[in-house]
Amino acid sequence: MTYIDENQLLEYLRSARDYFDAKDFEAAYRACQQALNLDSTNEFANKTILKAAKEIRKARKKELKRRINDLQSLWDLKEYDKLLTEYEALDKFYPEYPPVLFQIARLKTLSREQKEKASSKYKKEIKKNIKTLHKDGKFMETINAIEQIKPYFEGESWPDDLMQKVKHDYVIEQLKSRKELLEHQEYERLYKFLTKLYQIFPEARIKKYIDQTENLILENRKYEKSVFIEDSLDFINSLYNQGKYEESMQVCEELLSLTGESNLKAKKFYSSARKSNEKEMNVKIKEMMIEKNKNLNKQYLEAPENFVKI
């Protein structure tokens, strides 16, 4: 047999009655629960807890309606996310109340549709702005913008399609300057320009222009080399005709070091200049010897005693 603390039980029952009479139904409900924990068969506690629960539901329902009415401004503003938060809080306050459950389900649908609509509108605005950039000829800005928004349009083909078109238009526009660079024979600049363009848009048929430009650079270098050689040979010939054989030989050596030993004209000029230089040197030495002999003869005639006969 379970021992019941009669004094404690009476205290709980008195508290339950006093709270109920004072319309503090929440406190009356708790006091009844405490009494029933001691004596679950107590008639007064069982009847009073049912009455208190009924009054609590009645009061909460009234409060619920008041709080629902206060949410009308959010309905007017179509703040569905905020409304959903408020109704989920109401469900905790008054669980399983059908009107609240209905509104929660409704708000979830409205919130999702609102977000989808906003997303669709936002996407349309983005698409419009990007097409405007393209139309205004701002190709690089358009390319960068498409790269940034592509993750938000996953599964849609238009970003990739537009990217191809924009890159194509950009290449076409840039290739206009190719003609100008060709006219001015700025092949090195043209090569760098085309290489950079190819990196941006490898799908375009730019590679053939790069190959053509490489050939032009090689041909131009070959031409510049031939012009340099001809100018150098003319200069060597000029030095030779002026009798500047040593300078002519020096320029020949420099030319041969730059163009290689296969330059026959330079080698021929060098050989001629060397022979002429040697001949000139021999003449000068002979003249010096003759002049020296003259001086010796003169000195002998003037003072023969200074000389020794051998």
Image (cartoon, rainbow, N blue to C red):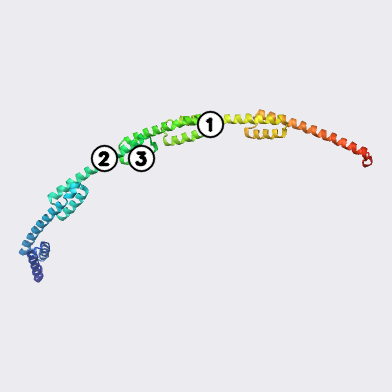
Question: Label 3 amino acid?
Answer: Ala
For the residues labelled 3 and 1, say whether their Cβ atoms are less than 8 Å apart: no
Residue lying at the far bottom in this picture: please name it: 7
Question: Label 1 amino acid?
Answer: Ile
Drawn side of residue 16 relative to residue 260, left or right: left
- Work out whether residue 138 or residue 10 is closer to the camera in this orientation and state it: 138
Residue identified by numbered label 3: 145
The C terminus lies in which quarter of the figure?
A: top right
Residue 125 in view of the camera: yes
Q: Secondary structure at mark 3?
A: helix
* Crowd around label 1: few <14 · some 14–19 · many ≥20 (10 Å): some
Q: Which mark is residue 217?
A: 1
Q: CA distance from mark 3 to mark 1?
A: 36 Å
Question: Label 2 amino acid?
Answer: Lys
Coordinates of residue 211 in the picture (x, y in percent): 49, 30
- Work out whether residue 280 or residue 105 is closer to the camera in this orientation and state it: 280
- Taking the spot 85% from the left edge, 34% from the top edge, the residue there is 290
Q: Earlier in the sequence, mark 2 or mark 3?
A: 2
Q: Which mark is residue 121?
A: 2
Q: CA distance from mark 1 to mark 2?
A: 53 Å
Drawn side of residue 61 relative to residue 273, left or right: left
* Crowd around label 2: few <14 · some 14–19 · many ≥20 (10 Å): few
Coordinates of residue 274 in the picture (x, y in percent): 73, 32
- Work out whether residue 4 or residue 183 is closer to the camera in this orientation and state it: 183
Name the image quarter holding residue 140: top left
- Taking the spot 78% from the left edge, 33% from the top edge, the residue there is 281
Q: Secondary structure at mark 2?
A: helix
